[in-house]
Amino acid sequence: MTQTSDNVTWLTQEAYNQLKAELEYLSGPARTEISKKIEAAREEGDLRENGGYHAAKEEQGKQELRVRQLTQLLAQAKVGEPPADDGIVEPGMVVTIAFDGDPDDTLTFLMASREYASADIETYSPQSPLGTGVNGKKVGDTAEYELPNGKRASVKILAAKPYSS
């Protein structure tokens, strides 16, 4: 999954299905559950001192924000094929890099939109400084990117394989 500058989000069919299922859950069963929590807390009495009520309302707000994010994301989504297994770094690839030529200082990450981030693998956006630096490079290439402090860093591309969950 990646985002382009014209606000189109490219998704694999698998990613699209996963996000659509999350949206359907949040806008259906999850809404019902949170409404019941709010109603039960409301029945407990004074709302000014009702921690359960305030917690449920906060949870509802976060849930509704996620529904809006997913709705917008899916409205702009284009479904496509995963990237080719050609060793070229692009969105949808799991990339392994070595920092400053030190083969022991490596990082493996998924280059994708933050919407596709998971606990299984670190995710870097193609628009991030590192993502911009490595995008389009091939295995064996060296890439430079700008650090937050303004200095430049270089990395060597060790591997680039299509992501599969």
Image (cartoon, rainbow, N blue to C red):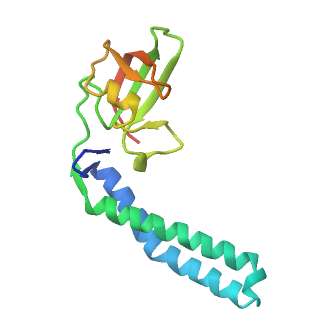
The image quadrant that residue 132 belongs to is: top left
Classify residue 73 by image quadrant.
Answer: bottom left
Residue under the point 32% across and 51% down = 14
Q: Residue at x 51, y 77 (%)?
A: 31
Residue closer to the observer: 127 or 124 = 127
Q: Residue furthest front?
A: 150
Residue 35 in percent (x, y) is at 57, 82
How many marks overall? 0
> Which residue does the image show at 24% across and 52% down from the upper left?
8
Q: Quadrant of the C terminus?
A: top left
| Quadrant in which residue 96 is drawn | top left
Residue 9 percent coordinates (x, y): 27, 51
Q: Is residue 124 above or below residue 107?
A: below
In-front residue for pair 33/130: 130
Q: Please state, as top left, top right, bottom left or bottom right, where the N terminus lies in the image.
A: top left
Judged left or right of residue 104, residue 135 is: left
Compared with 129, 72 (above or below) is: below
From the top left corner, tell me how far across and down residue 127 is, in percent: 34, 37
Q: Is residue 20 left or right of residue 148?
A: left
Q: Residue at x 44, y 74 (%)?
A: 27
